Image (cartoon, coloured by chain):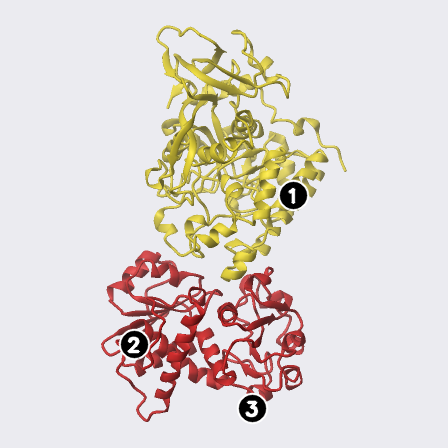
Chain colours: A red, B yellow
Amino acid sequence: MAEGHWSAKHLLGIAELEANDITSILDTAESFREVASRPIKKVPTLRGKTVLNVFFESSTRTRSSFEIAEKRMSADAINFSTSTSSLSKGESMLDTARNLEAMAPDVLVIRHPHPRVPHQLAGLIDSSIVNAGDGAHEHPTQALLDAFTIRRHKGTLEGLRVAIVGDIEHSRVVRSNVLLLRKMGASVVVAGPRTMMPRHAEALGAEVAYRVEDALEGADVVMMLRIQLERQGNSGSQLLLPSTDEYFHLFGLSAERLALAKDDAIVLHPGPMNRGVEITSEVADGARSVILEQVANGLAVRMAVLYLLAGVA
Amino acid sequence: MKEQDPVERGPVQRDPVELVRAAKAIDGFPSGSVLVRGGRVVDPTQSQLAPLQAQAAAQAQASEGAATLDAVCDVLIVDGVVEAVGTDLEAPEGAEILDATGKVVIPGLIDIHVHLREPGQEWKETVASGTRAAAAGGFTAVACMANTQPTNDCRSVTEHIVEEARRAACARVYPLGAISKGLAGRELAEFGDMAKAGAVAVSDDGKPVENAELMRRAFDYARHFDLPVVQHAQDMEVSGDGVMHEGEFSARLGVPSIPAIAEDLMVARDLLLLEETGGRYHVQHLSSGRSVELIKQAKERGLAVSCEVSPHHLLLTDEDVWKAGLDPNIKMNPPLRSAADRDALVAGLLDGTIDCIASDHAPHHPDEKQLDFSAAPFGIVGLETMVSLILDRFVRSGHIDLARFVELLSTVPAQLMGLPGGSLAPGSIGDVTLLDLECKITVDAGSFESLSRNTPFDGWTLAGAPAGTVVSGRII
């Protein structure tokens, strides 16, 4: 295994990482990527370690990705979700922490609908914590796997222009990605309807555009976000978006619009996609789409994070 | 626009002698005398040392802008009422002597916005514990909100609170009645009945009155009893499920937010209603700079509007929420706003647009605040930190003088709610607060008299502190 320079107790967010930490995680992920191509996709790195995947919010993809990563590293992986555990959002943080602690896990992978819950738990608990998404705040492993995917295609992140399009206000993917890409020397433009843009969007550290065309112009990387009709914050989806059809006409990524980006631009999407809403099938399945690579790379990145946090070198 | 009734533009018109008599009837003032001796007496309602037999009514007319009484002298309280203020007063036989040497002696401080949680949520606070906190914090009277369980929306609940206060209180307690039954925002509560039982104003605090027609009727109906209509100004549609100020820091944290305009919209609406109906309108815990401006304009147009600000909105901003890493003890509603809003509040305080300071003392049990920021209830305690915060950050720094401090925390609150007190003029109620301007304190939430500990000021070191109270001649 490659030696990582990043050594920390938790992965709470991209905010807590330096550029060389990010590089070291991505470098480590390169060597784990190779594991997936073996006939027997299992290494003993986390043998005897217990990893709890505690999901206070439903998730299939992220949770499965973590679970596969953990199993490929021979960890004992156990899933908790709100439907199968008594831990609820009304339980005190201290009780939640003590309950989890009592099971003596080595690593806790936590997703919660509220911002900074993993950070709060980290102050109360001995185990390592990996933030698998806290509200609309951070989703560090997603940003790392996106960066990993981009780097594999572009060689570097430095100097790239990355366009992120969709519901910026309610997206943790955006916040982590902007932080990471800026730290690595890329420039980022976020675009979306004004109803989906935080009112002080400039605080995110990215350029802000309200026409998708402005964001796509000259982009090296185009990241389309899922329009989540079920999670539209305060006001109900109908207040943010009159219809998915209108969204598609204003912001959807079609082949014509993609032509505004650089010729070698790649297209990312954190999944699951709404075809015909934020992206056409032509683009999603086209030559420049790296969407399925992101899924595969997610495993390698999550293995790298777990290894660096809990692995025995 | 219509001219507002000039009477409503002044203080709530209740005869000060009558107020004292009424308070006496409720509290049963102790007989006997207290001589508060040798302190620096500061009282903006008196311009000079009063002759011994001066009547309260004459004092109440002390002309505005006259020099404040600020002199080392004595205050004599007999049978619960201030008898005399002067130098070298003789202690009547059997009088208790309270040595105030080196202390500042001022009219008893009044906090017109607290939650005592009784009846119904006695694990957070009770009338007894809340008034112990008030006394420890230098307050001789508090006005408590109606969002109890059951709601204080009828005479029997008002009476219960008044009775509890009489039995247990270390400070005078003035309940506010609800505007709407059950705070449900649909039907008016019985203002007249509650007023008879001791309610001094009406408010649905904790919630706004969302329905404009209900608010219009509340203004109309409250005029029968000269009750101020007290509003927690928040447009609930705009604030949605927000938990912190909408700004740079909510954007970075991805936290659902409460825009400042949620307050502005409600204040603007209410001012339009007030202009039509007449009556008295008091805006609670102002947080937005734009609302300060709206109220300033309304006052210039002659509307009977008043407003309060809390110490936390004067001292903290949304950046502090960010720095505290979303600690639930820095979560309250309205939320801490931007530095620009904070600056506008301070300016409004200094230019007189803001009438008084009130704590919005909102106790929550530590268990309830151990949830994460989004899930934890709104509110922080304030009774035991307010005086030191204002003394240290506003008086000591020279932004306001002691006379203005007394106006903001005693005289004006008494006028706004029509309460006895706010003055040490002979004939006034014998409520006194002592301050020690020199002592340095470190806020220790663990040692609060309040049953709750939820404060963002824990560990702050401040100069100046309350040093005791006298309530109707009773040394607390």
Q: Residues within 10 Å of mark 2 (few under 14, many from 20)?
A: many
For label 3, the residue is A287
For label 2, the residue is A77
Structural distance between the alpha carbons of marks 3 and 2: 36 Å
Label 2: element kind = strand
For label 1, the residue is B270
In this view, the residue farthest toward the bottom is: A39
Residue B410, compared with residue B35, is above or below; it is below
Tell me the mark number nearer the camera, choosing from 3 and 1: 3
Q: Residues within 10 Å of mark 1 (few under 14, many from 20)?
A: many
Query: Mark 3 touching mark 1, by CB under 8 A?
Result: no
The residue located at (54%, 11%) in the rendering is B49
Callout 1, which amino acid? Asp
Structural distance between the alpha carbons of marks 3 and 1: 60 Å
Callout 2, which amino acid? Ala
Of marks 3 and 2, which one's residue comes earlier in the chain?
Answer: 2
Label 3: element kind = loop
Q: Position of residue B82 (x, y in %)?
A: 48, 14
